Image (tube, rainbow, N blue to C red):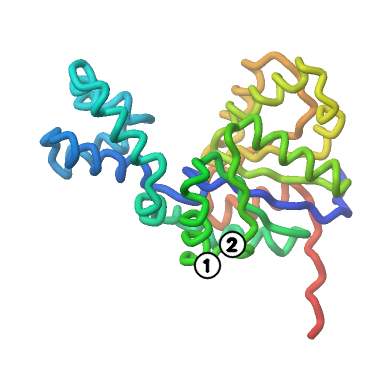
Amino acid sequence: MSTRSETPTFIFDIDQTLAGGLMLLHLQHYNRSLSLEMSEAEILEASQTYAKTFDVPQIIDYRKENEEKFQNERAYLRTSPDLHRALAPIDGAKAGIDMLSAYASDIRYYSVRPQEVTEATTDWLHVHAFISAAELVICVSPKDKLERVVEIATKKGTQVVLIDDSLKDLLNAAVELAAEASPLVNDFSQLTLVGFGYDDPAVQELLANRGESIGIEVCALPSWETGAVMGLIAKLQFVPIPAKRS
């Protein structure tokens, strides 16, 4: 692949891509509000062991007889501005975006979150000094996110790079759009999906198991370590934007 001449738009997911610790905060809240009597060590271990709070044994046991109370607390957490402001940035995320900004025409953030936490999300981006923090779009689903991202590629006529940990969900959405004969499929070639937290073998396995060709470039970004970000830059082969003269 030759060096690309266009300057892309970079779009970043937030939860589990830029912001971490959501599982830990959820479990700490459930432990207090539902009186689960988990120790801090147990909470930490569970947050590192299980992919979802639904999988934690203490949550499973509680829900057997107290489902309504659990769902009430879950609804509270989903729309809690305080919780979303309390998330910790993933190590290296800000520095990684700053590196990628040298190759981007613009930087944006797209997150599948309730509308109630829009202001808290923008505040979080500002507090942690993420570039272009005001460029936030709240989406209702992975499919909605994918449609909005491809529409940018259509409008601008250049490549759009979406870095997101929900790669499987986005690929499913792409297949769904193709099945619907959406005109957006015509611009799939202008989209690059970067699976955050994936390595190259994991991405290739995901694509191989899928079986469909969707026409979207897909690659991996295992972490925000400098070497991983530089590897992504080399793989995408975009050229830096010349520095503006003062």
Residue 39: give its label.
none
Q: Residue at x 23, y 26 (%)?
A: 59
Q: Residue at x 31, y 28 (%)?
A: 71
The image quadrant that residue 227 belongs to is bottom right
Q: Which residue is mark 1?
A: 129
Task: State the SS at label 2.
Answer: loop
Q: Residue at x 82, y 18 (%)?
A: 181
Q: Position of residue 96 (x, y in %)?
A: 58, 58
Q: Position of residue 241 (x, y in %)?
A: 80, 65
Screen quadrant of the N terminus: top right
Residue 133: give its label.
2
Q: Which amino acid type is shown beneath numbered disc 1?
A: Ala
Q: Residue at x 38, y 30 (%)?
A: 51
Task: State the SS at label 1.
Answer: loop
In the picture shown, does residue 56 fall above or below 5? above
The answer to whether mark 2 and mark 1 are in CB contact below 8 A is yes
